[in-house]
Image (tube, helix red, strand yellow):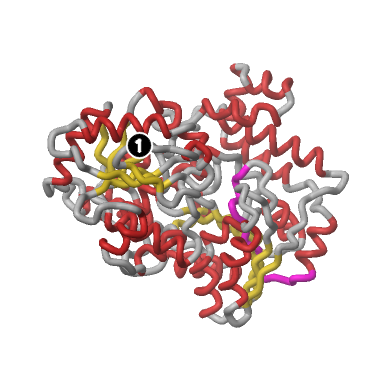
């Protein structure tokens, strides 16, 4: 089987590393098509992207190409306007759990449409699943860009996979459009756990939509009005490496590399994106001082790991007992930076943050987690639907203030870990619902294979929901 994977930019390959290798092991020919988009100011970023995808070229039947075409024909404006209107309207559905985010994309939607959607009649209209079924049928009537259509035809794939599928103006959708017009089987892969509630709408109905877990399948069905029979739960292939890595460095070696005292414990502060937490430096300074003012924590160290797209606020940051490592927030997509990140997690006493995917990686590596849930970050926490996945999982300790956070850290350092069982249950249903001992990338590969053959998706297990997982485990 020939498989074409269209990624809107190369960074999404982090979700496909083990998927591609699994497809190749099954004897399929895999081509990854993407383009380079600069996400940071680093001059080395293009080489970084190439290094990320080097594993594709290293397998038999694998290849990658940075020559993705961005739609630019005379249909581009009406296509983009339609997509913008639907992206905006999605947030006005009463089913949506983060309606305040509509303002982020309002500028792309014409003012008359915004006004119409906000009326009582407009809200009733977009609340209906039938509206979205019709909208997708109408969207599918737009012809594909001729260059994209020719590129797909030349690849002659049996199935086209698009990721992230629901981003605003994501270019992979135009490759899925071309594939649908050519009668090729299609798969939309939702990139991450927040995408269904913080990004755009599902504009085209593909043969299969892949999501990490059953809670996200619920979002795809109820928020995006996607047919449940087309949604498949696969687990999160992005985290496969963290189940397989070992500690490469002793604690002493790691602390020497990070500039820490190996005889003292440290907590890890994991940064959030700028949209979620803004400038975190002042918050971290307050947190560090509050912790060290607590009896027994006077010499506690803190490592700050910046979010890779929110590093500017850490330039010149200094606070006693706090180390920013790595200073540039290196993305853990390559072997060296990934091992650094893994070691930082596993040698920490606890992981603290606002609202970030790093909490999932901390859970995978079995680290106690803590979030200060307060008005300070309300818009990036309780007002974001995806944050409630963390709360529903029950594995994160929460405190409304810094003093409470210090008490929780004190208990953790004394050996208490009351949320460990919840962490394992969360990882089981949220990250690896296909089995803790099985790579999610293998499950994704099987789903793509079935879609290419037109086979039905398997039923979701009863333990795929957090409430059922807790009940099954006696929680």
Foreground pick, 160 / 405: 405
Residue drawn at x 81%, y 50% as measured from the top left: 143
Where is residue 393? Give x, y as percent. 30, 44
Where is residue 160? Give x, y as percent. 66, 63
When the figure is inspected, residue 51 is found, relative to residue 261, above or below; the finding is: below
Where is residue 125? Give x, y as percent. 61, 27
Q: Which residues are magenta?
A: 154-167
Where is residue 365? Give x, y as percent. 30, 58
Q: Is residue 176 visible?
A: yes
- Residue 161 lies in the magenta-colored region: yes
- Residue 66 lies in the magenta-colored region: no
In-image side of 189 versus 413 (left or right):
right
Residue drawn at x 31%, y 37% as measured from the top left: 371
Q: How many marks?
A: 1
Foreground pick, 213 / 124: 213
Residue drawn at x 22%, y 53% as measured from the top left: 472
Quarter of the figure with residue 47: bottom right
Find numbered disc 1 in the image and state the secondary structure of the residue it sits on: loop
When the figure is inspected, residue 113 is found, relative to residue 25, above or below; the finding is: above
Quarter of the figure with residue 116: top right
Foreground pick, 407 / 263: 263
Q: Is residue 159 visible?
A: no
Dot 1 surroundings within 10 Å: few (below 14), some, or many (20 or more)? some
In-image side of 149 versus 35 (left or right):
right
Residue drawn at x 74%, y 71% as measured from the top left: 156
When the figure is inspected, residue 188 is found, relative to residue 278, above or below; the finding is: below
Placement of the N terminus among the 4 image quadrants: bottom right
In-image side of 139 versus 375 (left or right):
right
In this figure, which residue is indicated by the disc labeled 1? 319
When the figure is inspected, residue 293 is found, relative to residue 49, above or below; the finding is: above
Foreground pick, 253 / 248: 253
């Amino acid at each position: 089987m020939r498989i074409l994977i269209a990624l809107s930019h190369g960074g999404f390959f982090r979700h496909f590393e083990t998927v591609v290798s699994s497809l190749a092991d099954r004897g399929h020919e895999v081509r990854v098509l993407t383009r380079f988009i600069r996400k940071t100011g680093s001059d080395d970023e293009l080489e970084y992207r190439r290094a990320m995808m080097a594993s594709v070229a290293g397998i038999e039947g694998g290849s990658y190409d940075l020559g993705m075409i961005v739609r630019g024909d005379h249909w581009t404006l009406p296509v983009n306007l339609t997509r913008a209107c639907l992206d905006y309207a999605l947030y006005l559905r009463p089913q949506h759990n983060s309606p305040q985010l509509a303002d982020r994309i309002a500028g792309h939607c014409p003012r008359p449409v915004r006004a119409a959607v906000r009326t009582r009649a407009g809200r009733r209209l977009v609340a209906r699943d039938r509206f979205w079924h019709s909208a997708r049928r109408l969207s599918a009537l737009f012809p594909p860009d001729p260059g994209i259509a020719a590129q797909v035809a030349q690849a002659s794939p049996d199935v086209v996979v698009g990721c992230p599928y629901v981003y605003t103006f994501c270019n992979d959708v135009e490759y899925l459009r071309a594939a649908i017009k050519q009668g090729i089987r299609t798969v939309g892969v939702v990139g991450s756990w927040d995408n269904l509630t913080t990004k755009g709408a599902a504009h085209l109905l593909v043969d299969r939509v892949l999501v990490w877990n059953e809670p996200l399948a619920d979002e795809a069905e109820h928020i995006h009005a996607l047919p449940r029979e087309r949604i498949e739960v696969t687990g999160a292939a992005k985290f496969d490496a963290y189940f397989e890595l070992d500690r490469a460095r002793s604690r002493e070696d790691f602390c020497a590399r990070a500039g820490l005292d190996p005889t003292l414990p440290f907590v890890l502060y994991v940064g959030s994106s700028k949209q979620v937490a803004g400038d975190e430096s002042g918050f971290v300074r307050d947190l560090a001082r509050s912790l060290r003012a607590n009896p027994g924590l006077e010499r506690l160290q803190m490592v700050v790991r910046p979010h890779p797209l929110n590093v500017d606020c850490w330039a010149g940051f200094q606070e006693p007992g706090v180390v920013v490592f790595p200073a540039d927030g290196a993305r853990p997509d390559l072997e060296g930076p990934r091992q650094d990140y893994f070691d930082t997690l596993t040698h920490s006493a606890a992981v603290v943050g606002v609202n970030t995917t790093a909490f999932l990686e901390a859970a995978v590596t079995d680290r106690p987690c803590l979030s200060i849930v307060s008005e300070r970050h309300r818009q990036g926490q309780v007002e974001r639907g995806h944050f409630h996945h963390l709360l529903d999982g029950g594995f994160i300790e929460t405190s409304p203030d810094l003093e409470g956070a210090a008490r929780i850290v004190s208990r953790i350092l004394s050996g208490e870990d009351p949320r460990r069982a919840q962490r394992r249950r969360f990882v089981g249903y949220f990250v690896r619902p296909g089995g803790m001992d099985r790579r999610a990338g293998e499950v994704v590969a099987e789903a793509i294979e079935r879609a290419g053959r037109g086979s039905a998706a398997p039923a979701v297990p009863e333990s795929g929901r957090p409430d059922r997982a807790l009940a099954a485990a006696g929680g």
